Amino acid sequence: MAGDVLNIKVCSPLKLRSGLIGNYHAICHYSYKSPLCNIINPTPMKSINLICSLIFFQISVCNAQLTFRIDESISYPDLSVKISESVSYPDITVKIGENVSYEDFTVGITSNKNQADFIITESRYPDLTVKASESVSYPDLSIKMGETVSYPDVTIKIRKSGTVDYIVFTEKAYISLREIVIALLPAINKELDYKYKKIPIYTEQTNSPTQSSNNSKSNYSDAVNVLNGAKIFAQDDKNTYLGKIASEYDSESIFNEYGTYGSEYNSSCIWNEYSTFGNEYNSLSPFNDYSSKPPMIVKNGKIIGYLTTNESINGGISPYILKGLKDKF
């Protein structure tokens, strides 16, 4: 819900369960600092060989809010997380607290549900159900978190007031530090270049007085129209065809799990992490953060972008972000 600065006044306090970083007093006067992310770099791209021209565009994938139901007793969760201050060999280490320095982003806790990016709910129909505790067996994700974590992957500063990047709301009477970290997983995953596929992608930039929800829908609707039907080609010697950006029912679609280019078991599929074009260590793969020749997105004989997690590539769009849009095609 980031965008232009908003003043968010909070009238009633929320308490943070003691035991990790103490209790919080009233939280008030939050404002947003910056957008969560822009999927496609807005920097103009240069023309390349054999291409007449390039199309430049910017996408915003908009989820008004993400809701999480967090409970250690959920039987069939969307995501299971082992999380505590003492997890051994964690997937992610998070340093979080009021007194941390050199933070990657900031967060505040609000009692104004309408202004929150992430909501901890008790509803039976959340966006994501998460089973989380320090004793979860066979978790999808393990997280070591706390204010004294050494060499963290992500550092988060909690602010009681002022300017923050993200805001969390809870429907519960109390909110624990553990729940804050779970609610912030989409933001944490962004900092980690969308490494974890089970964590939903959140790139909200709306709720600004200068940007209406209709305009937001138009933004990604226009982007989908541009991308729809585009074909993906590798930058190898043969310009290997890697499929089409189209409905999951299209036989050539990269979203068709039963098709040649959407099945993670097929060597021509970018979702096959063991294939040339899906292996994060291969220079031709869209998942190589340092690749200088990722797959091209081509439509009507023109390159309109590149499929890549390399943020330095002009016109690059992350394959994870693209997958988040698949229901729009």
Image: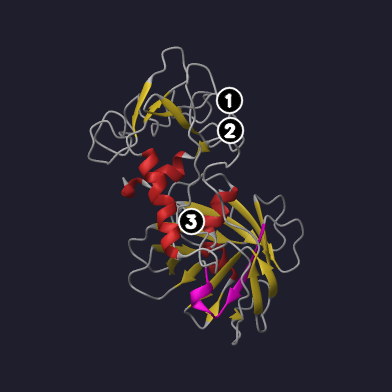
Residue 78, above or below 281: below
- Under mark 3, the amino acid is Tyr
Q: Secondary structure at mark 1?
A: loop
Nearest the viewer among 211 and 25 is 211
Span highlighted in magenta in the image: 105-116
Res 203 visible = yes
**N-terminal of the two: label 1 or label 3?**
3
Q: Residues within 10 Å of mark 2 (few under 14, many from 20)?
A: many
Disc ID at residue 292: 1
Residue 296 placement (x, y as % from top left): 46, 27
Q: Position of residue 109 (x, y in %)?
A: 60, 74
Q: Mark 2 sits on what residue?
A: 313
Q: Quadrant of residue 262?
A: top left
Percent across and percent down for residue 292 are 58, 25
Q: Mark 2 near mark 3, Cβ–Cβ under 8 Å? A: no
Using the rendered view, name the quadrant where residue 250 is placed: top left
Q: Amino acid at mark 2?
A: Ile
Q: Earlier in the sequence, mark 2 or mark 3?
A: 3
